[in-house]
Image (cartoon, grey):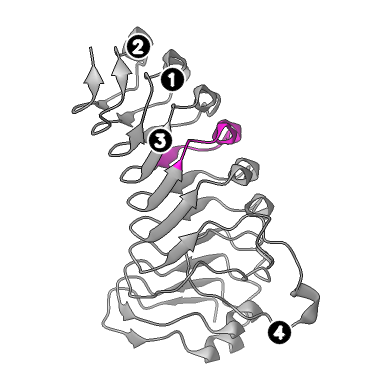
Amino acid sequence: MKVLTLEQNLITGPLPSEFGHMEQLAKLGLSHNLMTGLFPSSIGKLTQLKEILLNENHLGSSLPTEIGLLMTLERFEMNDNEISGVLPTRKTTHVFHRFSLKCEACLTILSPNFANRTAEIGSLSQLRILNLGKCRISGKIPTEIGLCNSLQDLSLFYNGLRGSLPDELGNLKNLSILSLGGNNIDGAISTALANARNLQELSLFDNRIQSEIPSELGELENLRFFSIHDNNAVIGSLPTELGLLANLQNLWASNCTLT
């Protein structure tokens, strides 16, 4: 079997360990169910997996530290679950390759060869979609995210992220969606974001951003949606450069301190 989708049902309980026997599986879809618990370690045997979709369940724990055997993984979605913890970086002492940071399952990889590998978001060169919205993720956005060259959608809305926007986000030349609303992100809006020229959606609403809106954002010629509302410390005036963006359709900047 290569595709198993059981989305929008009433399935309960944890992911069964027997999934590990489906070694040809390329897509596993179980979104919109009532599942709880953690991933079974046997999921590491599914080395052909390209998509894992577990949105809107009740899975809960810390972010996965392993899943590093899934070398072909391109899409891992697990928004609106009960995951917690920080986004893993190279300081984490487990494996992480091509993983879309959307799961909270702490897998136990049985092979001792992986016991001391370093977890590094920058290793996820195949990753296209990273969606961890409406979870309990905390900490800072790691700078290693800038090494995920294939990333097109980075959605971490409604979490507990803090700190400033890393300049390395500007290295994501394929990024079209950056959705970070509803966090505790502070500091200035990085002018390096202007280097992510494929951005179509930039969502920074309801944070603690403390800066003017940089005029460099006027270089994002593909930008269609920009929301920065509910940031009381956003000051200054709207850059005139934004008015030159022919594709911009929605600009939300209410409840700031613009003049």
Whether tag 2 and tag 4 are in contact, CB under 8 A, the answer is: no
**At x 57% / y 77%, what residue is drawn?**
25
- Magenta-span inclusion, residue 170: yes
Residue depth check, mark 3 versus mark 1: number of the one nearer the observer: 3
| Label 2 to label 4: alpha-carbon separation | 54 Å
Q: Callout 1 environment at 10 Å: few (<14), some (14 to 19), or many (20+)?
A: many
**Of callouts 2 and 4, the N-terminal one:** 4
| Element marked by disc 1 | helix
Whole-angstrom CA distance, mark 1 to mark 4, is 47 Å
> Farthest residue toward the left?
255
Image quadrant occupied by the C terminus: top left
Circle 2 sits in a helix, a strand or a loop, which is it? loop
**How far is the residue under mark 3 from the one under mark 2?**
20 Å
* Horizontal side, residue 68 vs residue 181: left or right: right
Indicate whether 35 appears above or below 218: below
**Where is residue 193 shown, x and y percent of the image?**
50, 27
Identify the amino acid type marked 4.
Leu
Q: Which residue is mark 2?
A: 239
- What residue span does the magenta drawing correspond to? 163-179
Q: Which residue is mark 1?
A: 217
Q: Name the amino acid type tagged 1.
A: Leu
Which residue has dot 4 on it? 110
Residue marked by disc 3: 186
Q: Which callout, 3 or 1, points at the residue further toward the start of the chain?
A: 3
Decide whether residue 42 is among the magenta residues: no
Marks 1,2: beta carbons within 8 A: yes
Identified at 35% across, 11% down, the residue is: 239
Q: Earlier in the sequence, mark 1 or mark 4?
A: 4
Q: Is residue 27 left or right of residue 232?
A: right
